[in-house]
Amino acid sequence: MSRARFLFDTSVPNWHYDADCRDHDPELWFADGTGKATAYKDLLYAKSICDACPVRQLCLDDVMRQEGGIAAEGRHGIRAGLTPDERYQQHRRNNRKKAAA
């Protein structure tokens, strides 16, 4: 994904400029990992890019805010290094912590 796209899109949060994913094919973050071996490799590769990203926490905060209580089936792609199911489980853990406090 090129920087040029972000330069003219005022709806993109500023942290996107520093995201490691910006220079990669967006389809990489939508490999489901359940099909052929290359899809699983793409899934692992996308997660590894996210793991080293300097704005990973901002990305995670953003996606958790966007997805809210959406079920795992309604979430898509790798975001902040997490699969849809991993983000759903994170959401559930966060809600349990809030309820216990």
Image (cartoon, rainbow, N blue to C red):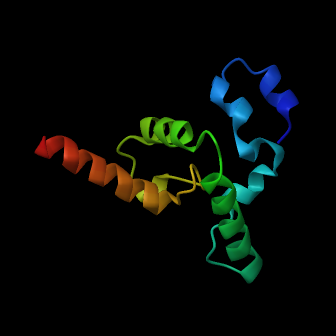
Residue placed farthest to the left in the image? 100
Looking at the image, residue 80 sits to the left or right of residue 40; the answer is left
What is the total number of numbered labels drawn onto the structure image? 0
Q: Position of residue 14 (x, y in %)?
A: 66, 23
Among the 4 quarters of the image, the one containing residue 45: bottom right
Residue occupying the point 64% across, 42% down:
54
Rendered residue at 71%/34% (across/down): 18
Q: Is residue 30 visible?
A: no
Q: Is residue 79 left or right of residue 26?
A: left
Can the viewer see residue 50 in this picture? yes
- Quick check: 85 left or right of 17? left
Q: Looking at the picture, tell me which residue is in the foreground, 26 or 71.
A: 26
Q: State the residue at coordinates (68%, 75%).
A: 40
Q: Is residue 5 above or below residue 29?
A: above
How far from the left and from the top, in percent, is residue 8?
81, 19
Q: Residue 94 in the image: state x and y as whole percent.
A: 29, 47
Where's the C terminus, which quadrant? top left
Q: Is residue 68 above or below residue 36?
A: above
Q: For the N terminus, which image quadrant?
A: top right
The image position of residue 60, as x and y in percent, is: 50, 43
Q: Is residue 42 depicted above or below 3 in this figure?
A: below
